[in-house]
Image: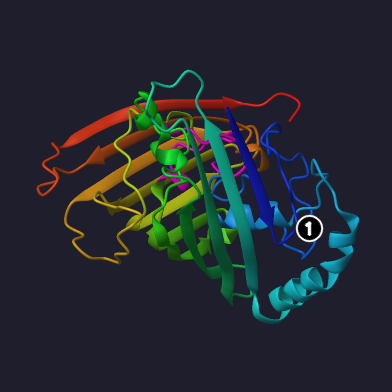
Amino acid sequence: MGYILRITSALLVLLVSSSGLSANENAGGKSGYVHSQGQSFAGPGSTTAQLEEDDEVKAPTFRFEAFDRALESWFQWKGKLREDTGLQLGVAYTALYQSADNAPTGVEDSAGSGIFRLSGSWELYRSESGATGKLVMSADHRHAYTEIPPADLGFETGYLGIPGLLFNDGGAILGDLNWQQSINGGRGGILLGRYDPNDFLDVLGYANPWTTFQNLYILSNASIALPDWGTGVGIGNWFGEQWYGIGSVSDANGVASEEKLFEDFGELYSTAEIGWSPSRDRRYLNNIHATFWHADYREEANVEESEGVSIGANWTFSD
């Protein structure tokens, strides 16, 4: 059993009974953050996607109109900040509580944790042709309310998995710090810096740790030797309106708690992916793709060289 509560700068209060996927894919939000769902190569849990989704006008499970009215000036200020400086700003607090039925005697059978996140997407370059360059950044503070956080509840109760992937007690964590440059008239992009490979690789529309599922084995493909946040470079491009290709090279030893930038960049994780979607704006909800990956031998971790191919598909009916 588990409950998640998410409060953002848009005053969104969401219980995890809903999917978190929106059919309003290209509408501007309360601060004018245009939603480009599926057209970029970032997944629904990425920093840029969450900035846009949190800003959308939605019908939450609970609505407090007095709070909405009180925050109108906040949204207007954020909109003006975007217009004047190109900065999109996000503030969110997400809390998760989980409990286990029939847990072994003498173990912790419940866990709660919270994450405060500050994020931003700062457009610093725009050419006459419409090409853009932006600095994307995020930082978390992760803390437990109970003896153990949800990330440890599975191991505590005998389940070999992580039922609350992001919800640990890791303290202050640097997330994204990367440059994202659009190319080819907005049909492609280049990424350089610190990022989470899981936000760009094997993307499936339901896999969003902030608004849908929290279990590691739903959010990621266990057959892929996927590293955590680390430094890398990636490139992607749409070929026509239905086919796309992406590739990346990143630090095979990436760990969220280690705030490295191009340090020990000798052992690499390389990927190439080709995919199909009915249209660019349906990529989150409807896509089929093949992902090829290779991980170098990791000397200090004593992990052998590995490689593989993964086939993924995601098809949503009636949004």
Let me know if residue 21 is in the magenta part: no
Three-letter code, disc 1: Gly
Q: Quadrant of the C terminus?
A: top right
**Camera sees residue 44:** no
| Residue at figure coordinates x 39%, y 38% from the top left | 152
Stretch of the chain drawn in magenta:
198-216
Q: Quadrant of the N terminus?
A: top right
Determine which residue is flagged by label 1.
28
The local secondary structure at tag 1 comes to loop
Let me know if residue 210 is in the magenta part: yes
Left or right, residue 313 beside residue 192: right
The quarter of the displayed image where residue 261 is located: bottom left
Foreground of the two, 55 or 145:
145
**Camera sees residue 211:** yes
> Up-down: is 47 above or below 89?
above
| Residue at figure coordinates x 22%, y 41% from the top left | 295
Foreground of the two, 229 or 37:
229
Q: Position of residue 92 (x, y in %)?
A: 62, 58
Q: Position of residue 253 (x, y in %)?
A: 24, 51
Left or right, residue 269 beside residue 21: left
Left or right, residue 284 beside residue 298: right
